[in-house]
Amino acid sequence: MRPTNLSEWTSEIGGLGTLPGAVMTYWNLGTIPWDRFDRSRVDPQLLAFARGACLVEFNADTYSDYLCRVFGNDTALQAQIRTWGEEEKQHGLALRKWVELADPSFDFDHSLAVFRAAYQQLPEDGGDSVRGSKARELVARCIVESGTTSYYSALKDAAEEPVLEEICRLIALDEVRHFNLFRKALDKKYGPKEKLGFPSRFKVVVGRILETSDEELSFAYRAGNFPDEPIEQDRTKEYSKDFMRRVSRLYEPEHYRLIVGLTMKVLGIYSSQRFRTVLSHMAHRFLRYRYQATSTLPQL
Ligand SMILES: [Fe+2]
Ligand SMILES: [Fe+2]
């Protein structure tokens, strides 16, 4: 039977490892068992990912302001967007605190300033979506949230340090709720209102997936890990390739299965488990192959 709610859906698509069903999970920095931090189990590559991730998450303010302008007449959705922004910021604060435990020399404010100076994609005023319409904006947000669900699931599964594992588990649960928040607004309101059909959804989905290797994540990775090296805009492709090469090593087919399953949901396609498994394995093999080349950038 086709799953009807988030909990059924996430357990049906699988890929969240040992995560429980996606219930409304509220947590704060005090919930995290910081006293279990074990320096001897910190992986340098995961630490490097966390340095970049805390910058992107903390920067959510920019996005919630932008989204509130786009959905200017929808006060109910605006309130949810504000909560969403707070939760994203909390992801940044939790990751920042973990990074500072693992690497006391990490200068968050400096790295954030470097990142913000290098990366500015959203308009600072005006209420138009950069995606062309409100429904298209929601499709793009769903893809981002499916990507983060998958990313933190992959980090959680790779982490041996118990506090990082717990942080990533909590964040992954939030991300799948975020996905559902934007999908509900898309399916119940803005999709039907704009009559956004499969071809338009597909176009936005493909566009946003291709942007996954864009500047935001790779610039944050550079700013978090090499804050004193200038980020050169004409080396964007090189930075992106380096970042994707590292990330693709983290991913197993079950992590791609999450993206595939959630993306099918956004497209309004019900796919069989077998279809998702085949597609996930193909994505896994393709991305490993594509990004297997050795980077010319400085190594950690
Ligand atoms: Fe997040
Ligand atoms: Fe999120």
Image (tube, helix red, strand yellow):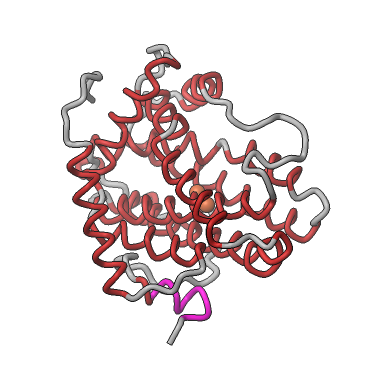
Quarter occupied by residue 181:
bottom right
Check the image and name the residue furthest to the bottom. Answer: 1
Q: Left or right: 204 with respect to 279?
A: right
Q: Say whether residue 7 is magenta.
A: yes
Residue segment shown in magenta: 3-11
Q: Say whether residue 57 is magenta.
A: no
Visible residue check, residue 29: no
Residue 254: horizontal and vertical position, in percent? 27, 62
Above or below, 162 relative to 191: above
Give 81 or 37, whichever is nearer the viewer.
Answer: 81
Above or below, 281 relative to 67: below
Residue 151: horizontal and vertical position, in percent? 37, 50
Quarter occupied by residue 182:
bottom right
Residue depicted at 22% across the width and 59% down the height = 281
Considering the image in quadrants, where does the N terminus appear?
bottom left
Most prominent secondary structure in the magenta stretch? helix
Residue 93: horizontal and vertical position, in percent? 51, 41
Residue depicted at 31% across the width and 47% down the height = 37
Check the image and name the residue furthest to the right. Answer: 73
Residue depicted at 44% across the width and 75% down the height = 9
Visible residue check, residue 244: yes
Residue 217: horizontal and vertical position, in percent? 42, 34
Above or below, 119 relative to 180: above
Give 243 or 98, whichever is nearer the viewer.
Answer: 243
Considering the image in quadrants, where does the C terminus appear?
top left
